[in-house]
Amino acid sequence: MNPTPRPLPPRSQAALDAFLARLAEHGATLIEPQWLGVDRPHRVRCAQGHDCTPRPKDVATGGGICRACAGQDPRTAESAFRARLAELGATLLEATWLGNKTRHRVRCVQGHDCAVWPSSVDRGRGVCRTCAGSDPKTAEAAFRVRLEEIGATLLEPTWLGNQTSHRVRCAKGHHCTPRPTNVMSGQGICSICAGAWDVLYVVADQWSELVKVGITSGDPRPRLGEHRRQLGLDQVVRLLTGLPDGAAYQLEQTVLVALRDAGVYPVWGKETFYAPRALRRMLDLVDGYRPMSERHPE
């Protein structure tokens, strides 16, 4: 930078020195031949060779130097967007540039028409919801096809979304509630088929503050021991063993749904409740499952 005809006032000189130091930190060069003041843009060449015009006061408070490097320059942003689309095999359908934060119509490499924000694409996101499995119609169709492949039936009357549980009847007739995203990633749909649960229990703490309903398989002692150590649930209120296929799960779900419908909600996890509100309702349903003579004593 050429020296100014006369010395700058101390405050202006200090501002200039700070501006030059900040530019040097960024590898930028001041092109402006004279100091114009902290509020006026100064011509600068950034480390990447872009000519830009930042204001010293903005740079001093942490602002960037180059709009092109920041993706704010329209021509640079458009060029970067077009280059990214070319990498992905996509075609821009818009006749003109609409801005970095406005949706642009695009046709992906598979021929799907979509609308994307350039700023999102430049951050590494894809262009096509259909290819990504997030398009509702495509996701629903794929979910239905997968259920048909494994002999299951969708019971929901409407599509609830890829991340929401849907009521399904598996090939063995069990009612279950898998999430489409899990099914499409290779997980099973039926927790009953995945684990042969044949035990249902109701446990509480010694002060009758907390109560939990749960299911397990085989010997229930390890599972009951976990609840005793983790939550202090050391009182076995009910213990049903040797239940037929699917009965433990169905009974547990019946209890949970009844509590929810009664406005009783868990205080921990999904199955642990405030005992004074939940215990009696739990026992009414569990005791109604089969005669007392067929249940283990407390």
Image: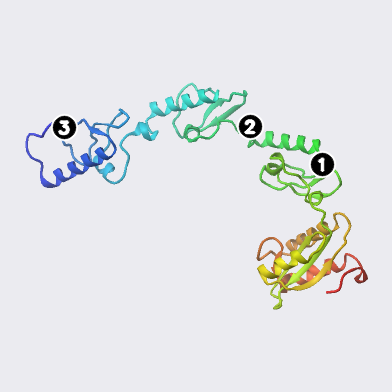
Inter-mark Cα distance, 2 to 3: 54 Å
In depth, the one of 16 and 103 nearer the eye is 16
- Looking at the rendered image, the quarter that the C terminus falls into is bottom right
Q: Amino acid at mark 1?
A: Thr
Q: What residue is pinned by disc 2?
A: 130
Task: Answer left or right for 208 relative to 246.
Answer: left
Q: Is residue 125 above or below residue 168?
A: above
Q: Is the residue 112 above or below the residue 28 in the image? A: above
- Residue located beneath label 1 in the image: 153
Q: Position of residue 40 (x, y in %)?
A: 22, 37
Of residues 278 and 101, the one nearer the viewer is 278
Decide which of tag 1 and tag 3 comes sooner along the chain.
3
Task: Tell me which corner region of the image, top left, top right, bottom left or bottom right, holds residue 127.
Answer: top right
Q: Count the marks: how many?
A: 3
Tell me the tag on residue 283.
none
In the rendering, which numbered label is found on residue 1?
Answer: 3
Residue depicted at x 27% and y 33%: 53
Which label lies toward us, 1 or 3? 3
Tell me the element at label 2.
helix
